[in-house]
Image: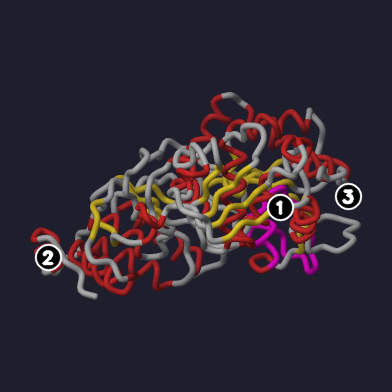
């Protein structure tokens, strides 16, 4: 399918500089995706700044050398180095130097050095209906679902190409007809106690992702009013276990004031009734450390911890000293707030290692322990940690994580069904 470029788009693509290269990448991607035209975008969130190899660094530096600059607001997802926190990244040379060059190149392109997977909690919040080009799976699903803006799951390095060109392919979740729910997931049979438990949303998100895959679904029967941190945890887990880019929750998310609106007035293709047994199975899947009698580390903050989540962490630690390393991953804007309130020092004195700009699953931070066990309250960490770190996982609530770190051994409360 040919892509119909506007006159200004065609003229830009015909150039020989970095902006021309970006426009050609976007146009060719549109052709491959079956889009007939490009859309102007208002912002981008760039996932390509995380070092995976020298080619990514060289690509970013080529854009810089050829004079490219982002045409829209562009925040940056996590990098491979902690430039603002207090942890040691065990990345050796030459990889460390290449990772640093990569991070510098993206800043030189005009991107904001936010270095967070949760830009929506750092002030980057496009309005409902705005077309944007966001990378990072949890950021994408939050942007689409909770904010109601429109983006596909943009990967490396299409995200930066869109940001430089100021355009994105007109396809997928940018189009209204692709945003209606085709799967109804009924959770009305789950108990009030389940929804009151702070493990509910990561567990439910992990189950939801496996149930719907990459389809657009809608949850019905949710009780209570989950806050942004709960929705953040749900979306991150769903985008990890599945390929979810957009979910709806009846009465809670902006495109689902009721079921009929969420489904576009059409009959859903599939209806799924979630049972307590399905939830229990989902919870079990988040732990790969069978009968763990020890933990070697605790990691929280995927997506990055908000200030409210640090409030709860402090309350749970309650001045006690941790016996096991606890890594708290967060963003610079939260770190600054902790510093301003002199809270960072007390957390670190208790044994918390604050990680900023990155996280323990995407770069080597955890100690190299054969057969290590990582405890977490994050559905996303639980999904990726075994493959990315070599640690087996033990899933529990934030309170479980803190009590385990204080005691030095696994402490798990009875899950609510």
Residue count near mark 3 (Cα–Cα under 10 Å), binned few <14, some 14–19, many ≥20: some
Q: Please report contact status of discs 3 and 2: CB closer than 8 Å, yes or no.
A: no
Q: Which of marks 1 and 2 is nearer the N terminus?
A: 2
Q: Which residue is drawn at 46% across and 71% down?
A: 53
Which of the pair 89/233 is nearer the observer? 233
Residue 374 covered by magenta stretch? yes
Pick whichever of labels 3 and 2 is earlier in the sequence.
2
Measured as percent of width and height from the top left, residue 360 is found at 63, 55
Quarter of the rendering occupied by the N terminus:
bottom left
Residue 180 in view: yes
Q: Mark 1 points at which residue?
A: 274
Report if the CB atoms under discs 1 and 2 are less than 8 Å apart. Answer: no
The residue carrying pointer 2 sits among few (fewer than 14), some (14 to 19) or many (20 or more) residues within 10 Å by Cα, namely: some
Write down the quadrant of residue 165 in the picture: bottom left
Left or right, 78 with respect to 271, comes to: left
Q: In this view, does 342 lie above or below 52?
A: above
Local SS, label 3: loop
Label pair 1/3, CB-CB below 8 angstroms: no
Measured in 3D between alpha carbons, the distance from the residue under mark 1 to the one under mark 3, in whole angstroms, is 33 Å
Task: Please tell me which residue lies in front, 118 or 342.
Answer: 118
Magenta region: which residues? 363-386
């Amino acid at each position: 399918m040919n892509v119909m470029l506007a006159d200004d788009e065609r003229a830009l693509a015909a150039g020989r500089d970095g902006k021309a290269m970006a426009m050609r990448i976007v146009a060719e991607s549109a052709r491959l995706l079956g889009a007939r035209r490009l859309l102007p975008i208002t912002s981008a969130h760039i996932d390509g700044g995380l070092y995976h190899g020298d080619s990514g660094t060289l690509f970013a530096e080529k854009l810089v050398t050829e004079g490219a600059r982002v045409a829209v607001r562009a925040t940056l997802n996590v990098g491979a180095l902690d430039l603002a926190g207090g942890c040691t990244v065990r990345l050796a040379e030459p990889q460390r130097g290449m990772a640093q060059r990569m991070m510098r190149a993206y800043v030189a392109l005009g991107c904001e050095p936010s270095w967070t997977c949760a830009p929506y909690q750092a002030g980057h919040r496009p309005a409902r209906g705005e077309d944007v080009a966001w990378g990072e799976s949890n950021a994408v699903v939050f942007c689409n679902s909770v904010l109601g803006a429109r983006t596909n799951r943009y990967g490396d390095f299409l995200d930066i190409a869109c940001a430089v060109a100021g355009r994105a392919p007109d396809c997928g979740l940018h189009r209204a007809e692709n945003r209606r729910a085709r799967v109804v997931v009924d959770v009305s049979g789950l108990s009030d106690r389940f929804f009151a438990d702070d493990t509910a949303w990561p567990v439910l998100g992990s189950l939801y992702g496996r149930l719907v895959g990459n389809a657009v679904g809608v949850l019905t029967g949710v009780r209570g009013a989950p806050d942004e941190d709960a929705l953040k945890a749900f979306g991150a887990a769903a985008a990890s276990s599945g390929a979810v880019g957009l979910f709806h929750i009846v009465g809670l998310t902006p495109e689902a004031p009721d079921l009929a609106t969420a489904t576009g007035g059409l009959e859903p293709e599939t209806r799924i009734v979630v049972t307590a047994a399905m939830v229990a199975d989902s919870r079990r899947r988040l732990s790969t450390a069978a009968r763990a009698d020890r933990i070697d580390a605790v990691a929280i903050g995927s997506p990055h911890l908000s200030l409210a989540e640090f409030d709860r962490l402090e309350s749970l630690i309650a001045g006690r000293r941790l016996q096991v390393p606890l890594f708290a991953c967060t963003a610079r804007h939260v770190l600054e707030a902790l510093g301003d309130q002199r809270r960072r020092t007390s957390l670190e004195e208790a044994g918390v290692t604050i990680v900023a700009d990155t996280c323990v699953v995407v770069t080597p931070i955890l100690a190299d322990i054969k057969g290590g066990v990582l405890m977490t309250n994050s559905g996303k960490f639980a999904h990726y940690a075994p493959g990315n770190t070599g640690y087996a996982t033990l899933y529990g609530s934030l309170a479980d994580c803190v009590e385990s770190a204080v005691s030095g051994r696994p402490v798990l409360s009875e899950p609510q069904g």
